[in-house]
Amino acid sequence: MGSRQFLWNFMKKSFTIGLIGLTIRDRYATVVPVRGISMSPTFNPGTNAFWDDFVLVEKLCLEKYKFSRGDVVVFW
């Protein structure tokens, strides 16, 4: 009986953490890899195929932000 209760509590916590993480990733910010040479030398200055640079994409400012030359924009 104790292992069943442990499993149930573990599943509830895992589901809750998953929902919170998904909401944060969908609404507020996410981490994405930068691949390819299009952003070189700012991102991926080397040509190592095994290591990518990662950037934090913040999604809250999109409605009020005035884009200017030199900004990095991510398209999906």
Image (tube, rainbow, N blue to C red):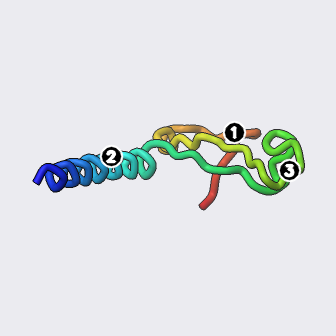
CA distance separating discs 2 and 3: 34 Å
Please name the amino acid that badge 3 sits on: Asn
Q: In the rendering, at what x and y percent does residue 60 appear?
A: 46, 40
User: Is residue 27 found left or right of 31 in the rendered image?
Assistant: left
The residue positioned farthest toward the left in the image shown = 1
Q: Within 10 angstroms of label 2, few (less than 14), some, or many (20 or more) residues?
A: few
Q: In the rendering, at what x and y percent does residue 11 appear?
A: 25, 54
Residue occupying the point 57% across, 45% down: 31
Q: Which secondary structure, mark 2?
A: helix
Q: Which secondary structure, mark 3?
A: loop
CA distance separating discs 3 and 1: 31 Å
**Mark 3 and 1 residues: CB-CB less than 8 Å, in contact?**
no
CA distance separating discs 1 and 2: 37 Å
Please name the amino acid that badge 2 sits on: Ile
Q: Which mark is residue 68?
A: 1
Q: In the rendering, at what x and y percent does residue 14 appear?
A: 31, 50
Residue, disc 3: 48
Q: In the rendering, at what x and y percent does residue 22 appear?
A: 39, 52
Residue closer to the observer: 62 or 37? 37
Mark 3 or 1, nearer chain start = 3
Residue closer to the observer: 62 or 13? 13
Residue, disc 2: 17
Q: Nearer the viewer, mark 1 or mark 2?
A: 2
Looking at the rendering, in which quadrant would you find the N terminus? bottom left
How many marks on residues?
Answer: 3
**Mark 1 and 2 residues: CB-CB less than 8 Å, in contact?**
no
Mark 2 or 3, nearer chain start = 2
